[in-house]
Amino acid sequence: MIKKLMLAVAMLVASTGFAFAQVDINKADAAALDSVKGVGPSMSKAIMDERSKGEFKDWADFQKRVKGVGDKKAAKLSEAGLQVNGKGKEGAVVAKAESKPAKAAAKEAKEAKAKPADTKAAM
């Protein structure tokens, strides 16, 4: 009974993950850019410097103008919530953020489902 209750709670917690906030590179200030996983103070400064010359047209323009941003890095930034003109990078999957306890609870729930019923009860 307790296992079933814990499973229900774990599934509820796992299903209520938090979505990443979307940050548009052409509108965000340095603090908002820094909040994106993978963007640090030096990259946000480079973004702000390049943006002062003109807005980024698309992801290709961003990658061309900001040193150190290749396809892989751009995809990771897009997955973390960075957008150019309201669009994520094509091919990047925008993931839902889950807290560590939610991930652990989901894993436990999955493992509990995979295990066979109590062997004593089956005999």
Image (cartoon, grey):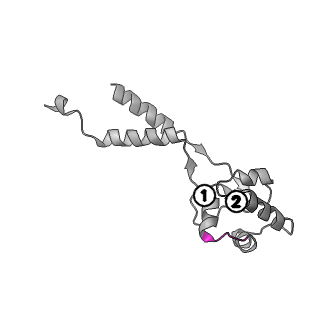
Q: Is residue 51 magenta?
A: no
Determine the CA span between mark 1 and mark 2. Answer: 9 Å
Residue 79: numbered disc: 1
Query: Which of the image's four quarters has the N terminus?
Result: top left
Q: Position of residue 110 (x, y in %)?
A: 37, 42
Q: Amino acid at mark 1?
A: Glu
Badge 1, how many Cα within 10 Å: few under 14, some, many 20+?
many
Left or right position of 22 against 46: left
Q: Residue at x 70, y 71 (%)?
A: 63
Residue beneath disc 2: 83
Q: Is residue 85 visible?
A: no
- The local secondary structure at tag 2 comes to strand
> Residue furthest toward the front?
42
The magenta stretch is: 67-71
Question: Is 4 in front, or is 32?
Answer: 32
Residue 81, given in percent of the width and then of the height, sits at 65, 55
